[in-house]
Image (cartoon, rainbow, N blue to C red):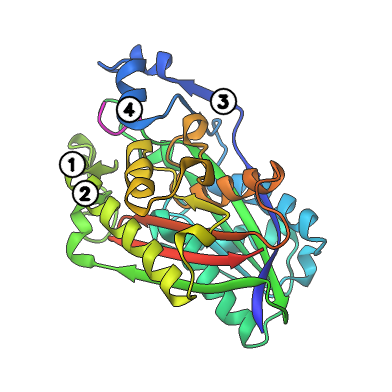
C-alpha cells in the first residue's frame, strides 16, 4: 500500500507585477533580473487576499480533479511560511472553508520544501490506513518581501497548489520521499523578526527585520549541491537512473540554479518543468503549482516517472519520486 496522487489543482492571484514595474520601484532592470533569475513577472495577492484564500482555491480544484469530496478527507496538511495568523493554524481555516468536517488539519513549516514534506507525511499516513489526505502549498510571499531591497524583491511571488492523496495497491504512486535539514545554515534564508527570538517592536520594524533576508551567493552554492544530491539519492533508492526520468519538477527559485543542477545530472532541459518566468519563487506553492501545470499540459500522463526536488529555509532539502 502506498499513496497515489489522485488529483492536482492550483491558483494564482490576478495582479501581475512585471520587471518593468520593479524598474520603477528599485534600482534594477528587466535585463538584469532575467539574466540573474530567469523571472519575468510574478503574481501578487490582492488587498485582503490571505494565504487561506489562495489555499482554498487550489484545494477545491484538486478535489474536483480527484473526484473526492471535502467531507471525505481525513487529513489536511498545509505547507506555508506566510499563514493568515501566528495562531491558529491556517490549515484549520482551510478545513472549515472547505467543509472537511472529518479532517484533522495542521500547518507544515518547511519553507520551500514544505509541499514535499507534506507529501512524505501524507504518504506515511496513507500507508498506515488513512484514506484521503489533502496536501497544499500556499504562500503570500509579498507579505514578507522588502520592496526596497532590490536583491530579494525581484524573486518572490504569491500562489498556491494542492494534491489529493489516496491509497494505491498497484505500482503507481509515491515510490519514496527523502527529507533533510541542517539548522546550522538557518541564517542563509530567514525572516528574523516577529517571533519569540525578536518579538514585534518599533526597533524591529525600523530595522525591517519582519522581511525575508537572504545570503544570495552562499545560498546558490548550497542549493545546487543539495538539489543534485537529492536527485541522486532518490534515484539510487529506487534503482533508477537519470535516463529513466520522464520529468523533473524542481523548486522554481532561480533559472541558473535549475540549469546548473540539470547540467550536473546530464538531464536535458526538455525533461525539466519550468514556470518561474511567470510566477517567480512562490516558496511552498512552487512545486505543486508547477506540478499541476505539467499535468494540465499533458507532460505528465499515466505511468510517467516524475521526480520533484526542493531546497529552502531551515536549511531544508527534499526529493520525492512518483510513478503517475
Reading the image, the residue beneath label 1 is: 217
Whichever of callouts 4 and 1 sits on the residue coming sooner in the sequence is 4
Question: Pointer 2 and pointer 3: residues touching (CB < 8 Å)?
Answer: no
Q: Residue 1 lies in what quarter of the image?
A: bottom right
Whichever of callouts 2 and 3 sits on the residue coming sooner in the sequence is 3
State how far apart marks 3 and 1 are (Cα): 30 Å
Question: Pointer 1 and pointer 2: residues touching (CB < 8 Å)?
Answer: yes
Question: Pointer 4 and pointer 1: residues touching (CB < 8 Å)?
Answer: no
Q: Nearer the viewer, residue 169 or 193?
A: 169
Give the secondary structure at mark 3. Answer: strand
Could you tell me which residue is drawn at 42 percent across and 73 percent down? 236
Q: Give residue 141's position: percent from left, percent from top.
A: 42, 41
Reading the image, the residue beneath label 4 is: 147
Residue 243 visible here: yes
Reading the image, the residue beneath label 3 is: 15
State how far apart marks 2 and 3 are (Cα): 32 Å
Reading the image, the residue beneath label 2 is: 221
The stretch of residues the image draws in magenta is 149-154
Q: Give residue 55's position: percent from left, percent from top.
A: 61, 50
Indicate whether 103 appears above or below 10: below
Amino acid at each position: 500500500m502506498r499513496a497515489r496522487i489522485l488529483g492536482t489543482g492550483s491558483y494564482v492571484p490576478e495582479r501581475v507585477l512585471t520587471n518593468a514595474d520593479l524598474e520603477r520601484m528599485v534600482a534594477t532592470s528587466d535585463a538584469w533580473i532575467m539574466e540573474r533569475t530567469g523571472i519575468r513577472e510574478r503574481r501578487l495577492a490582492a488587498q485582503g487576499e490571505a494565504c487561506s484564500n489562495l489555499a482554498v482555491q487550489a484545494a477545491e480544484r484538486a478535489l474536483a480533479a480527484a473526484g473526492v469530496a471535502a467531507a471525505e478527507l481525513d487529513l489536511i496538511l498545509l505547507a506555508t511560511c506566510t499563514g493568515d495568523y501566528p495562531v491558529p493554524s491556517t490549515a484549520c481555516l482551510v478545513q472549515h472553508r472547505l467543509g472537511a468536517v472529518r479532517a484533522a488539519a495542521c500547518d507544515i513549516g518547511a519553507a520551500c520544501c514544505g509541499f514535499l514534506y507534506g507529501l512524505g507525511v501524507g504518504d506515511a499516513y496513507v500507508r498506515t490506513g488513512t484514506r484521503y489526505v489533502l496536501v497544499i502549498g500556499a504562500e503570500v510571499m509579498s507579505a514578507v518581501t522588502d520592496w526596497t531591497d532590490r536583491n530579494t524583491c525581484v524573486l518572490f511571488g504569491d500562489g498556491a497548489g494542492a494534491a489529493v492523496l489516496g491509497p494505491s495497491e498497484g505500482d503507481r504512486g509515491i515510490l519514496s520521499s527523502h527529507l533533510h535539514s541542517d539548522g546550522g545554515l538557518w541564517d542563509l534564508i530567514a525572516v528574523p523578526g516577529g517571533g519569540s527570538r525578536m518579538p514585534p517592536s518599533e526597533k524591529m520594524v525600523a530595522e525591517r527585520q519582519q522581511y525575508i533576508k537572504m545570503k544570495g551567493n552562499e545560498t546558490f552554492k548550497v542549493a545546487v549541491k543539495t538539489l543534485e544530491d537529492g536527485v541522486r539519492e532518490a534515484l539510487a533508492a529506487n534503482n533508477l537512473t537519470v535516463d529513466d526520468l520522464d520529468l523533473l519538477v524542481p523548486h522554481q527559485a532561480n533559472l541558473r540554479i535549475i540549469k546548473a543542477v540539470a547540467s550536473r545530472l546530464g538531464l536535458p532541459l526538455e525533461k525539466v518543468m519550468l514556470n518561474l518566468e511567470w510566477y517567480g519563487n512562490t516558496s511552498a506553492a512552487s512545486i505543486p503549482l508547477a506540478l499541476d501545470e505539467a499535468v494540465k499540459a499533458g507532460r505528465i500522463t499515466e505511468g510517467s516517472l516524475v521526480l520533484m526536488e526542493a531546497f529552502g529555509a531551515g536549511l531544508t532539502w527534499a526529493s520525492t519520486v512518483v510513478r503517475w
